[in-house]
Image: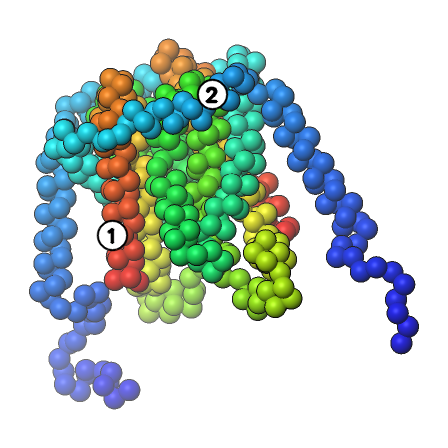
Amino acid sequence: MTEPSYRWQRFSFSQRLLRFAAYLGTVAVLYWTVRYLDIYWPWVWDAPQQIGDLFARMSPPKLTGLGAILKALVETIHIATLATVLALFLSLPTAYIAARNTTPSPVLLWLGRFIVVSTRSVNTIIWALLFVAIFGPGVVAGILAIAFRSVGFIGKLMGEAIEEIDKRQVEAIQATGAGRLKVVLYGIVPQVLPAFFAVAILRWDINIRESTVLGLVGAGGIGLILQGSIDLFDWQSVATILIAILGVVILGELVSAALRRRVL
Amino acid sequence: MSADAPSASSGQQRTWRKPPAIANPYVRYALFAAVAGYFVWAILSLEISWQRIMQGIPRAVTIFGRAFPPDFSRRSLMVDGFVESIQIAILATFIGVILSVLLGILAARNVVPRLVYLVGRGIIAVARSFHPVIVAIVFVKAVGFGPLAGILTLVVYSIGFVGKLMAEAIEEIDAGQVEAIRASGGGFFKVLLYAVFPQVLPRQVGLSIYQLDSNLRASAVVGIVGAGGIGGTLMNSFRRFDYDFALAILLVMIAIILLSEALSGRIRQGLT
């Protein structure tokens, strides 16, 4: 056996060329970004000190007004829960018409997909801006904002779940002479029920996080008093509120994990 | 299948009923009552004013009436905003991904001591728990209005997501390769470089591209609280009741998000 004369290399020449091009592209994009971004550099060098300063002003967290904070937290959870339930009601018909195998007509299929895409692509806070303009500041705007944003998310995942069902069960129900409603109820619903609970719990968890920011545009929840304390430069209260938000988000995560274990 | 024999012989009509999801009737009805009670409590405590909802409907008609047709005429304002959003997203992804690799290592149980692991996990959990808009509002107060606050926000956002998945990816690696490098006398950094990274990097590239897409979405909204990008333009047009311009911005935003989602999906598919 003769020793091969070439050195071992991990990548072939064309692979190396490709990798080099990718690095070059990344550097070029970064250069463009840094060069043309409207940044005032002294502020950048100053940033660590400013951030440290802010945290210094935040400590220790102030415990006065804890009652108001707890009340706002409960409101935040209510908003998230009610909005999730509303979204579930709105998104099931959407999922039904947005799934290729259950949609009654191609026009409705596209309508369903349009609803899914447009509601999902507009952020909660933008929905909240819109609903605050319509219904005025308050929890109604918040609930609708979260619900609308969730419709696309739940509709998409449920639509995919419906598309993946075993169609033999549907055919079996159809063969017994059942009408459309019965087919949905006994042929489709049992197959997508686990996905439904999984998606609902997941979205509720996300919605708790989302509903903490609604108040920044006036749509209720803990964000309202956060904005109030920031406007008053009451940083110690801000710290308390941030810790409270952290707590409620972690609580939401624990509850949804427990629910997931229990239900699924 | 004798149990399922038709009831014709007994002459009695039997109908099939769907078995309930919760077998125990007490638990079942208690659960129903608890859920119903919760909703009554939630709805009553929120003080929802039906009168204002009714008033809102004609207002919605006015707003949507004013929003159509969307006004694309102020193009330069729109382009500036979107370019800034994209720049924020790119820079934040770059910095965020580098920091996430670092934090991912610190938060992986199998490569660092337990104390470091807990600290790393803690940082990631905190970064993940706060919605980007809340992080943005704090950074805007700390470092002033503009894209810098937006970049810092999205760096935190990226750490929360990429860092967590990175740590999980590192925890799932094949320990054999780590042992092999250790056996050949490699120290901590050699182990990272030759045993850990090669196993997680493909995943990391996919995650980075996914995060770029997420950051692009988020960069559109951090501007609402003054952290730069198109969000600020959108907020202003809303405040000035320029609903036609706001709709134009929204439509372009949806188009860009869809495009970026499709692109990132395609690239990630190509990678694996």
Q: Earlier in the sequence, mark 1 or mark 2?
A: 2
Q: Which residue is drawn at 13% across and 46% down?
A: B38
Taking depth in this image into account, of B216 and B19 the one nearest to the observer is: B216
> What residue does disc 2 label?
A46
Q: Residue at x 34, y 67 (%)?
A: A173
Asked whether, in this view, residue A86 is left or right of residue A98, the answer is left
State which chain disc 1 sits on.
Answer: A
The residue at the far bottom in this view is B2
Q: Is residue B20 above or below residue A105?
A: below
Taking depth in this image into account, of A46 and A110 the one nearest to the observer is: A46
Give, as a three-letter code, the residue at label 1.
Answer: Val
Asked whether, in this view, residue B175 is left or right of residue A171, the answer is right
Q: Residue at x 12, y 33 (%)?
A: A67
Give, as a three-letter code, the residue at label 2.
Answer: Asp
- Examine the image and state in which quarter residue A5 appears: bottom right
Q: Distance between the residues labelled 1 and 2?
A: 41 Å
> What residue does disc 1 label?
A255
Asked whether, in this view, residue B147 is left or right of residue B14, the answer is right
